Amino acid sequence: MPRLGTLPITMQHEPQTISSISHPEDFKTYYYNQKLDHFNYRLDSYTTFKQRYVINYRYWGGANASAPIFAYLGAEFPLDEEFPNIGFLSDNAPRFKALQVYIEHRYYGESVPFGSMKAALKNESIRGYFNSAQAIADYAAVLLHIKKNISAENSPIIVIGGSYGGMLAAWFRLKYPHIALGAIASSAPILYFDTIAPQAGYFSIVAKDFKETSESCYKTIKKSWAEIDRVASEPHGLSTLSKRFNTCNELNASSDIEEYLVTIYSDAAQYNHPPSYPLSILCNAIDGASVGTDTVGRIYAGVVAYMGNHSCYDVNVFKRPTENSEGWNWQTCSEMVMPIGFGTSPDSMFPPQTFNLNEFINECKSFYGVLPQPHWVTTYYGGQDLKLTLHRFGSNIIFSNGLRDPYSSGGVLENISENILAVTTINGSHCLDILLARPSDPQWLVMQRKTEVKIIEQWIAKYREDLLAFKLHVRAKYIYEGNSTDSYQK
């Protein structure tokens, strides 16, 4: 399954910085004593762990002004790897006089119950509490705690998330509408479950992105798989491939380099952010190789351009377990089952391959001893017939997508109702709208963000109108019942 996340695998093209309008010292870290289990009443359900969250008060207009709270819902990464790059909150906090809150997802970063991720995943008695429903319940508890501490009961909350976090933001608004006034779900593939979106949707867009960038690059990649397999089948072929791709260790199978390449191509398409446009960098290298360079040599030139110059290339770098990847592996093997395959279309630039649910289930069972629940996400949150279901039920959600993002194939791309809106851009990539704004941003991206800001302003204006009407109603009722205006003020 292609990775999710707001940032590319390599930060070569996306340096981490703190927003220019915020100062590092403004971000204050806190820890909330979070319940392990929100949905049972067993003794161990009341066990607590420290959940990390960060607050920036710099621009907040205060509780008396009912100034809003922007809450970023952390996803499958430690919080300190995410929030320095999430610019939507810090870029717009001055305009809204908003409090900025960033909450870490349970079992990631410093919010792991009982020690390390590895220990938590080995412990069958606590591993089951690692799921999205518990995570959004955590966010509810933390946000209510913050509002109580700062006496901000009337401050509306807008939740923001990207990728998996975008799914969490949308689901949070649907499950906790009394806590969040609205949600921005950036690049949230909430329809990539239970065969709602086509299996090959993701890789079809990857191929389309490459073809639109450079048809010769697309054709070179398309024919490279057969060439790699041909070289591998020759005597000492794997040794030859290892030398041609300058791998740090000799390849055990041609699939080692092929999986490495698939990850690079997916990452380049998914995170083809301006101003560097890494997909163009990769294709320019493939196309620009010297005359006479064979297919394998051109593919290697693309690897060097995308990954940078190194003494050797570790083809297992993306497969090597990390705490983040181990956590996400568990989530995909329990509830986040997204059936993604290459497909069999002749337009694909990948070898024909479909997602095999039975193989996936057996593999997960061998890892964890439990069976994935491929239908649970749509059972618990919905997804089938989403437009019909949410047309009258839900409200105040922005589903933002860039149509060059492969995961947009599982996103909401059309308005569902007057206030569940799809904001799309033809050239956009994964989570680009919620990343830090830059002077070099193209006009279409600037306009996308302005559209989202305008929608949020409308939500907050309507909320304040309703709040004022409610207060006037309560006041009138109080006086009508024979009480004085002075006593009401008291």
Image (cartoon, rainbow, N blue to C red):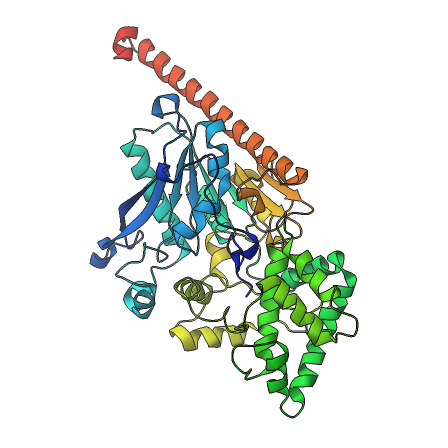
Q: Nearer the viewer, residue 339 or 240?
A: 240
Q: Is residue 451 above or below residue 462?
A: below
Quadrant of the drawing holding the N terminus: bottom right
Q: How many marks are shown on the rendered structure?
A: 0
Q: Position of residue 200 (x, y in %)?
A: 65, 64
Side of 441 relative to 369 (left or right): right
- At 51% across and 29% down in the image, what residue appears? 459
Q: Is residue 152 above or below residue 409?
A: above
Q: Quadrant location of residue 298?
A: bottom right
Q: Position of residue 139 (x, y in %)?
A: 37, 45
Q: Is residue 131 above or below residue 481?
A: below
Q: Position of residue 457 (x, y in %)?
A: 53, 28
- At 47% across and 50% down in the image, what residue appears? 165
Q: Quadrant location of residue 247?
A: bottom right
Quadrant of the drawing holding the C terminus: top left
- Residue most toward the left? 43
- At 67% across and 68% down in the image, what residue appears? 301
Side of 49 relative to 230 (left or right): left
Q: Is residue 87 above or below residue 235?
A: above
Side of 25 relative to 7 (left or right): left
Is residue 173 visible in the rendered structure shown here? yes
Q: Quadrant location of residue 122?
A: bottom left
Q: Nearer the viewer, residue 203 or 313?
A: 313
Side of 313 relative to 203 (left or right): left
Is residue 207 visible in the rendered structure shown here? no
Q: Position of residue 59 (x, y in %)?
A: 41, 29
Q: Nearer the viewer, residue 327 or 341?
A: 327
